[in-house]
Structure formats: structure tokens, C-alpha cells
Image (spheres, helix red, strand yellow):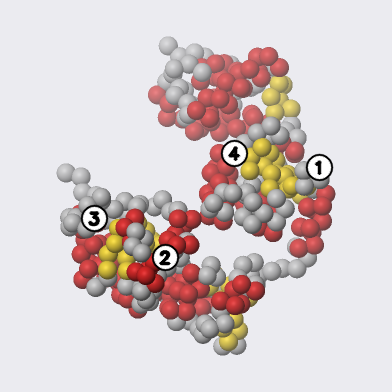
Amino acid sequence: MNIDFTTKEQVIFFMMTTSISLSHYDYKFISNMQSLTHDKKQITSGQADLFDKLLHKYRKQFSTNGYDPVELEKLIWKCVVVPSLPKYTNANVDWDDSIGKLTIRVPFKKDFISAFRKEMGNDFPDRSGSEENPQWEWNSERKRYEAIPTTHSLKLAYEMLPQFFTTVYHNEVKDIITELEKTTVKYADPTLIVEDGVYIVVNSNNVLDELLEECNLDNTPNCLYRMSQLGIKVDESITQGDPELLFASSYIVECDIDETDQWCNWLSNLNVENILLGRGSPQNGYDRSTGIFGECKNALQDHAFKLHMQKDLFDYDDTHIEDMHSLPVLIQFNSIVEPEQCHGANRNGKILILTNRRPIKIS
């Protein structure tokens, strides 16, 4: 027999029973809500809104127990609901002069945490947090992110935070952002563009300028391949959706197994000779000739590529590496990418992630 709920506090108690199976994060939230409504007799409007969202998130389990989440949402709160203060709902970026660091305070949001960590992993793979390679780090005591003040750390906050929160800048940081926003910058990163038929790299730097001295800039796959290795973006006006140019200009590319001949030809056109078989490769990769891996391996051999297991190639001496006429290309059979392992002595020209979009037949 179902309970005839009259308040949302009763629903909270019901959700803490075994009738509703909550995720770890949701259980902690509901447990906290139970304490707030029982002890303090007060919650915030933000907490109330999140509770209503959870009613719909677990709608199937509520329905199984004979309850309609829409009707549950209409129930009243017995406790007092106070408006959430902006400092608890917004992302706040500030400068802490006492420690000489940028700071970020944000409400808990799992999607933001995952995206922020991923972006930091892409930008700062060694996670050192040094001046040469800055990193936002979570300070558990102060309940905030902190970072060395650099262009990269501020740019990451500026680009990521508005995707998840209303973002407010304070004090010196506000002054910097206000000044920067006075001028609209179309290209924030080093980018290959074409103006009046002339190809140039905008927002370059001294290191890139030196590396580009001997490079003939144009819209050929080989030039765009070189741009991808230097971390230079390529403007859409150059690639224009052309699959081969997009392939050449991207350092990490997804390639479908059914298009193997096509991207093998593209690799040949880029003068690639050596292929590294990376993540997801069978341990006996050299001998494996069945399944998706076998199809890929056979196609690569048909196109005369030299195959190496990733861990094996760099076991050779330096002379062997120097004799290679082009950088090897890494092919992975799963989507976990660790570009920090693909530079320095282990550098490669490109990372291909093999995908399989074939429908699964269920008999």
C-alpha cells in the first residue's frame, strides 16, 4: 500500500529507504537534505530545484513504486525555502594576493568537474602545476580551485566556466577581463589562415616562427599535417569540410574500420612509413589476424606500412630512430588518449582512434 505523501520531506525519507536506489552523489545530497529539513528547518531555492530534478531523474523507480514524479513535485515544503545567494550559485573568479594565485569558487556540479579535469589533462598533461606548465588545483581546505596566474590558466577558466555557470569576475581579474573584452579576437590560438590568397599563421610566437622558417604555407595535406604537429589550428576557410584536409590538420582523429583503405592512402600521401599499434592491441598483435584488429593489421600491411607494437619501437637504439624518414603514427583501438606519452623521445605524428560503427546483429 502506497504512502499518501503530503510534504516533500516525506519523499526525502522515502528516498533514503531501499525502495529507491540512488547513486553515490545523489545519496549524499538526499542525506544532507534530510539533515537540513529536520535540524535547521531551512533549505535554499537551489537545493529545492535540484531535489525536483532528482524526482524526474529517478522517475522509473518512482513509477515502479506507484508514484508520479510530476505529482510529487507539486507537494509543498514544510521547512522554509530561502533564495540561494549568487555567491553560491555562480562561478566566482578572483585573485588572492596573500598567496599570489587565481581562485575559482563554483557550486558542486559533476559535469563541470569531469569536463574541467579533462580539459586540464589535455592542456597540461604532466599535471605538474609548475610555472612552465600551470595547473588549476583543488584546495580542499578552502573549497576552491587555485592556479598560478598565467594566460593559460585564466583562458581555461574564461572558456570553461560560462559553459556551466553564470561567471562573475572580481577585483584585479575583473579589470583584466574587461580590458581584454574591449577587443574582439577572432583567433585566440596560433592559427593558419588565408588572406587575399596568402597563407599566414596568426597569434604565433618566437618558437613557432623559428620552426616555420623553412615551411611553405599552403593548403596541401602535408602542410596541414605539419601544422597539427606544431599545435597550430587550421581555419575552416582552408579545410572547407574536405575529409582529407581535416584528417591531415587534426592531431587526434577518429577513423572507421570500413574506411581503412581511404585513410591508409591519406597516410601514404603524408609520407608515413611506420605505424605504432597502441592501446587496445592484442598482446600477440604481430600474429593476430582475426576480428577488427586483424582487418586493420592486414590493410596496413597491404599498404606497405611497417608495424610496431608501441612499447617495442622505442626499445631500439637511437640510430634506428634517426634512420626513420618520418614520425610514426599511433593507432589505438580504444578511445583513452594520453598525448603526454606521445612527445619527446616517444613522439609521433598523429594519433588515430579506430572506430567500429557496424550494427550489431542480435539473433
Identify which amino acid the numbered label 3 is placed on.
Gly
Q: Quadrant of the C terminus?
A: top left
* Alpha carbon separation for disc pair 4 and 1: 28 Å
Identify the residue shown where x is 48% and y is 16%. Answer: 17
Identify the residue shown where x is 82% and y is 56%. Answer: 175
Q: Quadrant of residue 140?
A: top right
Q: Quadrant of the N terminus?
A: top left
The location of residue 356, given as percent across then percent down, is 30, 56
Q: Earlier in the sequence, mark 4 or mark 1?
A: 1
Q: Which residue is mark 4?
A: 109
Mark 4 or 3: the one toward you: 3
* Alpha carbon separation for disc pair 4 and 3: 41 Å
- How packed mark 2 is, by other alpha carbons closer than 10 Å (few <14, some 14-19, many 20 or more), is many
Identify which amino acid the numbered label 2 is placed on.
Asn
Observer-nearest of 316 and 218: 316
Q: Which residue is mark 1?
A: 98
Q: Earlier in the sequence, mark 2 or mark 1?
A: 1
Q: Which residue is mark 3?
A: 285
Observer-nearest of 341 and 44: 341
| Above or below, 20 relative to 191 | above
Identify which amino acid the numbered label 4 is placed on.
Lys
Contact check, label 2 and label 3, Cβ < 8 Å:
no
Left or right position of 289 against 49:
left
Q: Earlier in the sequence, mark 2 or mark 4?
A: 4
- How packed mark 4 is, by other alpha carbons closer than 10 Å (few <14, some 14-19, many 20 or more), is few
Q: Which residue is mark 2?
A: 348
